[in-house]
Image (spheres, rainbow, N blue to C red):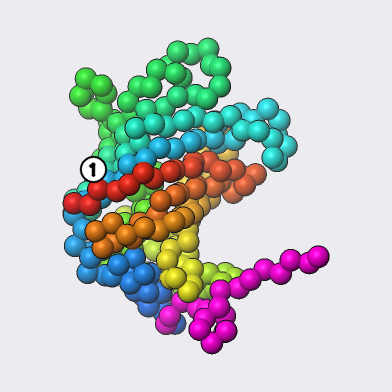
Amino acid sequence: MAVLAMKAQGPSGAVARVPGTTAKEAIDAAAAALGGSDPILKLGNVTLIGYAQYAYQNGGGNITALPGAPQKFIAANDYRRVYDLERGRMRHLERRNDLFPFANYGGHDFALQNQVLDGGVAYNVNEKGQATRGGDVRDRRMWMHTNPVVALRAALNGSATVSNRRQEGDLTLVDLKLKEGDALTIAIRPPSNTPAWIRWSGPNTNLGEVAYTTHFYGYVPFQGVSLPMGYTTKLDWRDVDMVKLYVDGYLID
């Protein structure tokens, strides 16, 4: 029996579309779907709490190179992302454990990873509280903006310009250019008008330049602003699920 794909339908049965015709109108519609422009702009800080799984070596550690081969995963417990939206800062904390036998004890010691982005400075903090420069500023800035509220807030407050509205199937796509010059694309799904994913390109040590796409699932309101309970970041290399993030909750301001 043939299975027909269902398209998003509006009240009249017509195919749903994100309201408006401009990039700004698409951003405004997405902001309204997540609680409204004013609540998003008034956010001071957001703390994400949950746990995650990473594909070992971005999927390169699989037992064979064939698509669908079982992946080796790394668990990330005590996972937190703190977004200081007023000051443009982010702190990422987690404790990793390799979910497979590994000769190096460090793969199983659950050491705290404490990575910080402070404007144009990236640094790490060890368990003794000592800070050292490290990490890629642009990479951390892009990961910061894979939170849909953070990306929309940048577009709403003028720290990112929006352009190039277009369609990709049922999704409306809009390009954002951050004040630092970095580019990303946000996809908005009708009829809910919630962000479906954010995509950007960046370097990879083993693969060269790759495209990262972070998909959002299960929006839930927290103090008037809706945030996703699941994030899956995929690479455009063998369609690998690079990171799966499971959210337990958010703390707002």
Residue 246 picture quarter: top left
Q: Is residue 89 magenta?
A: no
Name the residue located 36 percent from the left edge and 69 percent from the top edge. Answer: 33
Residue 193 placed where, x, y %? 43, 71
Q: Amino acid at mark 1?
A: Asp
Name the residue located 68 percent from the left edge and 27 percent from the top edge. Answer: 63
Name the residue located 33 percent from the left edge and 72 percent from the top edge. Answer: 32
- What segment carries the magenta color? 1-20
Q: Residues within 10 Å of mark 1 (few under 14, many from 20)?
A: some
Question: Which residue, given by chain and number where applicable, does mark 1 sit on?
Answer: 118
Name the residue located 59 percent from the left edge and 43 percent from the top edge. Answer: 240
Residue found at the very far bottom of the displayed protein: 12
In the rendered image, is residue 182 in sight? no
The main secondary structure of the magenta stretch is loop
Q: Is residue 41 above or below residue 87?
A: below
- Identify the secondary structure beneath mark 1: strand
In the rendered image, is residue 194 in sight? yes
Q: Is residue 90 above or below residue 185?
A: above
Along the line of sight, the residue nearer the viewer: 179 or 130: 130
Q: Is residue 2 magenta?
A: yes
